[in-house]
Amino acid sequence: MAQPLTPEKSRAAWELQARSVASSLGFDAEQTKATIEAYLAARTSHTEASDKMRKELMDKARDEGAQGAFAEIQQKTEELMKSEREKLEKSLSSKLSADQVQKAISPLGSFNRQWDTMTDALAGFGLDAAKMKDAQSAVQTYIVAVDKARAGGDREALRTATQEARKTLTDTMKDILSEDQMAKFQATLGGGRGMGGRPGGDGSRPDAPRPPANDPK
């Protein structure tokens, strides 16, 4: 399993993501700057609120028992993401058209920590501009596909969509990265089931918490 990113690396990844999305949508310099600023603020707010909420709910689960705790965490995680996504949309709308906001929010509103890990890996490869653009585009396509499938609520369809999206991502990356880079990129995804053999590996949210254990020891 890939290790969590430091706050500094997370922020750098977020900026790369926002800049990539802005570039793909043909934003001008002012729109790009506004997109980056809005996204950095949204990701910071979401991360802080999400971490605080999980800690409170996990403490509650230890004190009161695990029964039903995981379902409550999942529900509140989704509610928080919806709230933060709406705030991001509102912030983006100050500089972008309604159509531009909808196109930008598709990837940026996923608040996907696995995207952060993949972006950080790509940033460390020293790729030339053309390869970096293609790699970021491929990862963005994967993120959008999985987030769209997740919104449908069908876990089996989500699992299938995730597997298909991962295959497409892997095939594309093989044409961009060297063998050594590809091995390192695959390592950030993890092994085992689905996308990494961890929460999110079956297509569920990659930043979703683990179910509380019955024995809190």
Image (tube, rainbow, N blue to C red):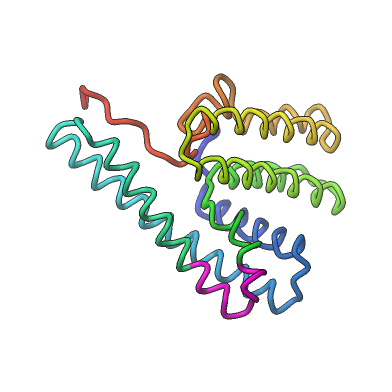
* Tally of numbered tags: 0
Identified at 69% across, 71% down, the residue is: 32
Q: Is residue 16 above or below residue 58?
A: below
* 127 relative to 21 in the view: left or right: right
Q: Is residue 128 above or below residue 162?
A: below
Q: Residue furthest top?
A: 192
Predominant secondary structure, magenta span: helix
Q: Position of residue 195 (x, y in %)?
A: 58, 29
Identified at 59% across, 22% down, the residue is: 191
Residue 91 shown in magenta = yes
Which of these two is toward me, 193 or 163?
163
Identified at 70% across, 46% down, the residue is: 141
| Magenta residues, start to end | 88-101
Q: Position of residue 154 (x, y in %)?
A: 48, 34
Q: Is residue 95 above or below residue 133?
A: below
Which of these two is toward me, 30 or 203?
203
State which quadrant residue 209 falls in: top left
* 122 relative to 196 in the view: left or right: right
State which quadrant residue 125 falls in: top right
Identified at 57% across, 25% down, the residue is: 194
* 7 relative to 217 in the view: left or right: right
Q: Position of residue 183 (x, y in %)?
A: 73, 27
Q: Quadrant of the C terminus?
A: top left
Which of these two is toward me, 38 or 79?
79
* 99 relative to 11 in the view: left or right: right
Q: Position of residue 97 (x, y in %)?
A: 65, 76
Residue 164 shown in magenta = no
